[in-house]
Image (cartoon, rainbow, N blue to C red):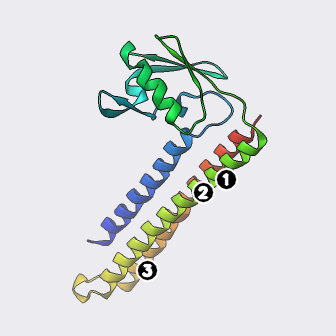
Amino acid sequence: MDLDEILLTAEEAMDKAVTYLKSELKGMRTGRASTALVEYIKVDYYGSPTDLRQLALISVSDATQIVIKPFDAGSTQAITKAIQSSDLGLNPQSDGKQIRLSIPPLSGERRQQLVASVKKMGEDAKVTLRNARRDANKHIDQIKNDKEAHVSEDDCDSSKDEVQDLLKKHEKQVTDAVDSKSKEIQEV
């Protein structure tokens, strides 16, 4: 592995951590209806767990209501059951053809819990970023100590600086995403 590969691998790992965090944050409940809230709920569809978005058309009818129209009317009961067993605390109303989810306003205490959860997710993402940095630096040190690699000490040091810059850039993305979601949750 050469220095460029190490940097590329570290950047890919950091990008994945940020992307994962952002996708998790989309599913966090705020006070208003969003299709992202339910898109990835796993529904037991004929024995296999399937994302809700693959089984139904999901739309927002107004700021407090999500409408789910299953492609297969036979899956309505399985979808209702999956929503009830998710930890979203939503009560689905089904008329046999479609399911309506009313999004109740969040209490102040629940908002604080959600903000704390968002911050924890952000910290977990930062730990993942730092692990990617640690792994990259370890590989750079191995190259530095390998006499057959023919890599100068200055090149190794500048690569470590690049890894640190990548970390700072990705940590800022995590902080921005967490701050944005926290602000969104706090809005009444």
Spot occupied by residue 125 in the image (x, y as percentages of width and height): 52, 58
Instruction: Identify the residue at image location x=45%, y=68%.
Output: 131
Between 28 and 147, the one nearer to me in the picture: 28
Label 1 sits on a secondary structure element that is helix
Are the two marked residues, 3 and 2, in contact with CB atoms closer than 8 angstroms? Answer: no
**Quadrant the C terminus occupies:** top right
Instruction: Identify the residue at image location x=66%, y=23%.
Output: 64
Other residues around mark 1 within 10 Å, as few (<14) / some (14–19) / many (≥20): few
- 163 shown above or below 68: below
Other residues around mark 2 within 10 Å, as few (<14) / some (14–19) / many (≥20): few
Q: Which mark is residue 116?
A: 1
Amino acid identity at mark 2: Lys
Are the two marked residues, 1 and 2, in contact with CB atoms closer than 8 angstroms? Answer: yes
Spot occupied by residue 80 in the image (x, y as percentages of width and height): 48, 24
Q: Which mark is residue 120?
A: 2
Amino acid identity at mark 1: Ala
- 96 shown above or below 4: above
Q: Closer to us: mark 3 or mark 2? A: 2
Q: How many marks?
A: 3
Amino acid identity at mark 3: Asp
Q: CA distance from mark 3 to mark 2?
A: 32 Å
Label 3 sits on a secondary structure element that is helix
Q: CA distance from mark 3 to mark 1?
A: 37 Å
Q: Which mark is residue 157?
A: 3
**Quadrant the N terminus occupies:** bottom left
